[in-house]
Amino acid sequence: MKTTNNHELLRAYAQEHSESAFEELVNRYVALVYSAAIRRVSGDRQLAEDVTQEVFTDLARKAAALPPTVMLGGWLHRHSGYVASTAMRGEQRRRDRERKAVEMNALNDPSEADWRQFAPVLDEAMDEMDAADRDALVLRYFERCELRTVGVALGVSDDTAQKRVSRALEKLRALLKHRGATLSAAALGTALASEAVTAAPAGLAATISAVALAGTTLATAATATAAKAIATTKAIAMTTLHKAVIFTVFAATVGTAIYQARQAANARADVQTLQQQQAPLTEQIQQLRGERDDATNRLVSLAHEKDSNTELLRLRGEVTRLRTEAQERARLKTEDAGKAAKSGVEEAESLIERVRLLKQRLAQTPEARIPELQFLSEEDWLRVAARPKQLDTDEDFRAAFSDLRNRAEGDFLRTMEPALLKYIEANNNQFPADLSQLKPYVEKAPGDDILQRYQIVPASSVPEAGGIIAGAGDWLITLKAPIDGKLALGRSGVSELNDSSGTIAILAPAMRALAEDTPEVNGKKTMDMHQLAPYLKTPEQKAAYQKLMQQSK
């Protein structure tokens, strides 16, 4: 009964644009889609919610094109996988960009002299900036927020937040230049990240609070606290236990304030705060800081006692020892950080040199080039250059060129995927007969030198596809003469069809059994690789199935 209702709801939305019908479909399947999404995005709840929203947005957009007999639950589950995979790749690219930005900033670490040069005029220059630019810099460098947090605070995306911070940093650099401080934007950003905010002296916050509270009387504090308690009572219905807890907190707060007010006149913080250290040294330095503060407090107390000179000298010696150890650990940490930065610089320079060699050698080898290479991103070049194998022999370069061509062909097909989906949606779910029909749906149409390298063929004519690649549909766009790897673009996206280990041959009996049990709809049999699992009989078939499913992700 539920299946019939699903079809009726989907038809009501597709034909009559019934919002209530679509809301009912969402209510039925939102838990299924969200659960599938959160498993595929490694537990990232925010990303899982984004994936769930996009899946139902796609359902609303494609509702009219779905076949009448579609199993909606299966379609949503499979589409959740496609959307989640795309989202994970986008998230990984964002993290890679942030990591590269941090590495490049580390290459231009300013010296202490640079900081001293513009520190006296930094705040004066920031006062002249627009509020929007100043807020972006304060969030990024003074509050030390990540770009995602900056974007949320400013109401923009991560990429827009990064651009806004970069523009504001450039404006600040120009203002500093007018005041005689000349340095690059990268050096300025690194200096702000490391020096803009320094830790306040130990005990300063407590001293300020005590002095501020010293001018108020106990009666005033009691009156203010009672007023807050009455206001809170009006907002929520408190139980007897709530009232007891509030009274206890009130009494403790007032008592602490009186004690701090009386001790504020004699309290002086004369030990500077050790800067927070990283990784393994952090815990040790925090422990030393606590021991130092304890020793200092005892020193202040003993200073007013006449007969404790010996103990006073011992404590002073202990404070000196702790300071020396902390300074030595900080020095060792700085040396280790310098070595790590130098190693990172050398690795980055080596990677850039390998990219240069690849581009130079490819320019000298015209027979290795294909027109799709124009779709390669800098990330593609860096990934190929980062291969563990050296670029010493002709064979090394041929292998690298093969990887580049395969990536370029995949990038081209992925740029054509939105155009294919738009064409299918605009033409009653029909596959194009010629690639030139996709040109009106592409923002920047590819040249004929690229299109003539591809063909549109039935999925059944591709042996590696086996006729039932998940979502392959009835037609595929493939290379006419593949050299490095076999790729195909179908209704469900780009797939790799290489089958050097005979995977499809092993699964052939299970495929035939599935085909026999699958009914025809409008003269066609529509099968899904996920339906193959019940037909696997041998361990070899199950292993081949797992391998094929892994390749299709």
Image (tube, helix red, strand yellow):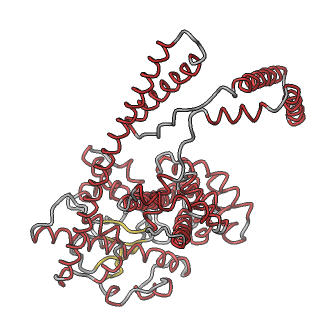
Q: Pick the residue in front: 518 or 542.
A: 542
Residue at horizontal 46%, vertical 40%?
A: 276
Q: Is residue 379 left or right of residue 170?
A: left
**Residue 206 in view of the camera:** yes
Q: Residue 392: percent from the left, percent from the top?
A: 11, 66
Q: Is residue 395 left or right of residue 193?
A: left
Q: Is residue 117 above or below residue 219?
A: below
Q: Pick the residue in front: 397 or 96.
A: 96
Residue at horizontal 23%, vertical 63%?
A: 350
Q: Residue 485: percent from the left, percent from the top?
A: 25, 69
* Residue that sits furthest to the top in the current view: 307
Q: Pick the residue in front: 45 or 171.
A: 171
Q: Is residue 146 above or below residue 479?
A: above
Q: Is residue 459 left or right of residue 184?
A: left
**Residue 85 in view of the camera:** no
Q: Residue 490: percent from the left, percent from the top?
A: 41, 71
* Residue that sits furthest to the bottom in the current view: 448
Q: Pick the residue in front: 37 or 543.
A: 37
* Residue that sits furthest to the left in the current view: 393
Q: Residue 244: percent from the left, percent from the top?
A: 81, 20
Residue at horizontal 53%, vertical 46%?
A: 198
